[in-house]
Amino acid sequence: MAVPLALPSAAIIIVVLLLSSGLTTAEVEVAAVLEEAVLTLDVSNFSEVVGKLQFIVVEFYAPWCGHCKELAPEYEKAASMLRKHDPPVVLAKVDAYDEGNKELKDKYEVHGYPAIKIIRNGGSDVSGYAGARNADGIVEYLKKQVGPASIELRSALDATRSIGDKGVVLVGIFPEFAGVEYENFMAVADKMRSDYDFFHTSDASILPHGDQNVKGPLVRLFKPFDELFVDSQDFDKDAIKKFIEVSGFPTVVTFDDEPTNHKFLERYYSTPSAKAMLFLRFSDDRVEAFKSQMHEAARQLSGNNISFLIGDVSAAERAFQYFGLKESDIPLLLVIASTGKYLNPTMDPDQLIPWMKQYIYGNLTPYVKSEPIPKVNDQPVKVVVADNIDDIVFNSGKNVLLEFYAPWCGHCRKLAPILEEVAVSFRNDEDIVIAKMSIL
C-alpha cells in the first residue's frame, strides 16, 4: 500500500527540504508524513515503507500503556525536530497490541511497551533504542545514530566533551586511519552504535586516562564504573565485540532512572544466573557503605554464578510489585535462584557479605510468602495461598485450573469475570476445581 502523496502546504515544504538533502524520490515519499510528524505504520504498509529507507525509528506501543501515553508527546515533538535534520530522520509508530500487527510484533521481538527499534538499510539491520525518553534526549541520541559510526577526536577538549561519566565510550587509537585494524573497528562501531559511543584518534595524549604515549592500534574502553578504563589490542571483529560486552558490563548493575543503565538491566535479568538484588533508597546516608559492600561481595563471590544489582526503590517500584516486596523492609537484600527466593530485610551494610555466604553454604531457608488462609473459601473461584496450595491443588486428587495473577494487571482483571463464569458452570462437579493465586 503506497503512502499517499496528496500533501498540504506544510508537507510540501518538507519535501523540498528532503529533496535538497539528496534523498531519492522514494525516500521523500515515505518521509513526507502528511500532517503528522510521526508516521503511522501497520502490517499493510510497514515493509514497503521500511524497505525504502536507510534509517527509520519505530515505536511499538499499546493504546492502554501508561508509559506509551507519557512518551507520545515527547516522541511527536522529537519527530517534528528531526524532520528538519540533515538528512531528515523519520519516526514512526505501530500499534503492537492490534492483533493485525502480531506478525510485526513477533518479528521485532516486542515483549513490553513501548519498544523503540532503530531499523537501518531497508530493514536488514535492527537494534534497540537506548536513549532518553524526552524530546531533547531522543533528538540528541538519534542525531548520533544517523551520523558517522565513529567520530574523530582531535583535541583534549573534544575528548573531555565526548568521554563523560554517564556511559561506556570506545576510543580507537591508530597511527593512521587505514588498515585492517581500523576497518574492523569501524565495522564493529557501525554494528554496536545503538548501545555505545565510538570515537577514534591518532593522539592518545588527549585522552583522560591510560597510557598517553601509546601509538596503537589499540581500543580503549572508558566506563563510569569499576576500573574506569580497559585496553585491548585484539582487532578481530568478534574479539572487539566480546571485549566491549564483557569489559563494558558493570560488576554491580545499578537500577535507577539513568537511561544509560537501562541496557545493563535488560542483560542482567536475561542471564541464567542467580540474582542478588539490594534495594534501598539512594537518599539513605548509608548508600555508599552498601555500594562498597555489594562490590566487595561481587568480587569475593564471583565464582558462584551470581549476578549483583543495587536498586533505588524510587525507580524500582514495578520490580518491587513483581517480586512481591514491601518498602517497609528496605534496605532489603533479595536472592532469586533455582532453589527459591531468599530475603534479608531491614539489614545493615556489614551484614551483607556474611548473609550472602550463608546463602552459598546452603544454610538459608527459602522465603515463601503466604497470605492468611481464607476463613471462608466457598466462592466459585477458590482462593489459593502458599499455606493451602498443597491441600487445594497438589494433594486434592482433583483436576485443578489455577490462575496466577497480579492485582494490578489489566489482563488479569479482564479475565476475572470469565474465570468466575467458568467456575460457576463447573460448581457441581466435585472433581473439578477452579482457583486463583496472587503472585504478590
Image (cartoon, rainbow, N blue to C red):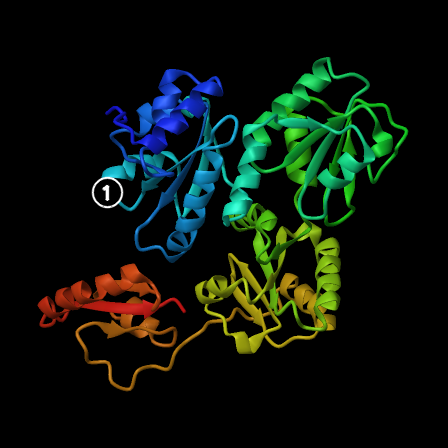
| Crowding near the residue tagged with mark 1, few <14, some 14–19, many ≥20 C-alpha atoms within 10 Å | few
What residue occupies the far bottom of the structure in this picture? Answer: 375
* Quarter occupied by the C terminus: bottom left
- Quick check: 119 left or right of 299? left
- Quick check: 370 left or right of 8? right
Q: Is residue 31 positioned above or below 59 on the image?
A: above
Front one among 180 and 41: 41
What residue occupies the far right of the structure in this picture? Answer: 213
Q: Is residue 51 visible?
A: no
Q: Count numbered badges in the picture.
A: 1
| SS category of the residue bearing label 1 | helix
* Quarter occupied by the N terminus: top left
Q: Is residue 280 visible?
A: yes
Determine which quarter of the picture holds residue 141.
top right
Q: Position of residue 114 (x, y in %)?
A: 41, 48
Q: Is residue 11 positioned above or below 325 on the image?
A: above
Q: Is residue 332 positioned above or below 150 on the image?
A: below
